[in-house]
Amino acid sequence: MKVIAALSTLIVLASSAPQQSSRDATILKYESNNIGVDGYNFAFETSDGMSRSETGELKNAGTDNEFIAVRGTISWIGLDGTPYSIEFIADENGFQPKGAHLPK
């Protein structure tokens, strides 16, 4: 349940990130590995300066405490030209973002 809340929060953060001409952006790189068994990973980069990578790993498989631990990074260029980046972990301890522009 915590992972779902964490991923929802991440989606909100990503969708609220300012983007320059994202309508005209093209995909420069896309990688995805998701066989749906014990984890996944993906990465992409677009021509407008946005990039994201994420890895999910199944922890405590087969137990009552089974969960997917997620690590990733999302970066973008703000409308004022400022680069932003968030590194995050979402695991049994909840969603834990880190970024120079985020309050500590």
Image (tube, rainbow, N blue to C red):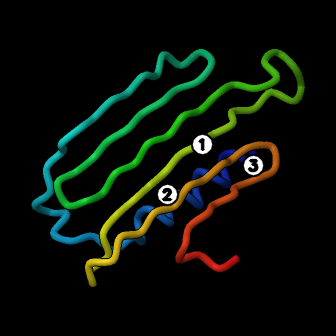
**Which residue: 65% across, 49% down?**
89
The residue type indicated by label 2 comes to: Ile
Dot label at residue 51: none
| Cα distance in 3D space between marks 2 and 1 | 14 Å
Q: Earlier in the sequence, mark 1 or mark 3?
A: 3
The residue type indicated by label 1 comes to: Arg
The residue type indicated by label 3 comes to: Lys
Q: Secondary structure at mark 3?
A: helix
Q: Say left or right for 35 vs 103.
A: left
Dot label at residue 11: 2
Mark 2 neighbour density, 10 Å: few (under 14) some (14–19) many (20 or more) = few
Residue 50 horizontal/vertical position (percent)? 30, 57
Q: Are marks 1 and 3 in contact (CB under 8 Å)?
A: no
Residue 19 horizontal/vertical position (percent)? 27, 70
Dot label at residue 2: 3
Q: Which residue is mark 1?
A: 71
**How many numbered circles does the render carry?**
3
**Which residue: 61% across, 63% down?**
98
Q: Say left or right for 60 vs 15.
A: right
Mark 3 neighbour density, 10 Å: few (under 14) some (14–19) many (20 or more) = some
Kindly indicate the quadrant of the structure image that contains residue 99: bottom right
**Which residue: 14% across, 57% down?**
25
Residue at the farthest right position:
64
Residue 86 horizontal/vertical position (percent)? 52, 61
Q: Earlier in the sequence, mark 2 or mark 1?
A: 2
